[in-house]
Amino acid sequence: MDGKMKIVSACLLGTPCRYDGKSQLNGEAARLFNEGNCVPVCPECLGGLPIPRASAEIVGGSGEDVLEGRARVMARQENGEMTDVTASFIEGAQKTLEAALRSGAAEALLKAKSPSCGCGMIYDGSFSRTLKSGNGVTAALLMRHGIAVRTL
């Protein structure tokens, strides 16, 4: 790491903000935080979604497709009912981008496989925990704006 400011998924810093109300503390992310070199974000929380919340996946494409209006982010409720949470995911991505631009961050370290933060691989929208190539909504938006994204 180069010591420059980075956007980091808050769950990787130990904040219990994942969909299941848990965190996934990562040593590299914690070091950046301790050095004062990161801005913690949870795009899903920034988009107004609660903790915990229903598991969500991108249906019909990837984060890029969501941003273009060709795919939706759907959450599967405990009763099996599907809820469209696309607007919250887009809002959270936009607020994350704003935080990155305000802080001058040129890189983001995000949570792997997430429909918001995943980079390179995300769940395929079948809710079977099957992965496919693609990026989450936030990762796609950050990359569109020249911010390097990698997952932890």
Image (cartoon, grey):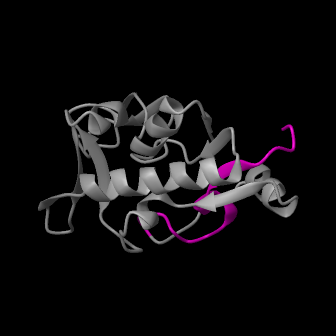
**Residue in the image at 65% along x and 44% along y:** 109
Which residue occupies the foreground of this view, 132 or 150? 150
Q: Examine the structure image and report whether residue 130 is included in the region drawn in magenta.
A: no
Up/down of 24 relative to 115, above or below: below
The image position of residue 146, as x and y in percent, is: 58, 30
What is the x, y in percent for residue 87?
Answer: 26, 55
Quadrant hosting residue 135: top left
Q: Residue at x 52, y 69 (%)?
A: 22
Q: Residue, x 30% and y 47% (percent of image)? A: 57
- Is residue 70 visible from the viewing direction of this image? yes
Q: Is residue 88 left or right of residue 26?
A: left
Which x, y percent locates residue 63?
36, 36
Q: How many marks?
A: 0
User: Going 67% across and 39% down the picture, which residue do you hit?
Assistant: 107
Q: Is residue 25 visible?
A: no
- The quarter of the image holding the C terminus is top right
The image quadrant where one finds the N terminus is top right
Q: Write down the quadrant of residue 62 in the picture.
A: top left
On screen, 13 above or below 129?
below
In this view, which residue lies farthest toward the top?
A: 133
**Residue 83 location in percent, x, y?**
16, 60
On screen, residue 120 versus residue 4, left or right, reads left
Highlighted range, magenta: 1-20
Name above or below for residue 37 compared with residue 23.
above
Q: Main secondary structure of the magenta part?
A: loop
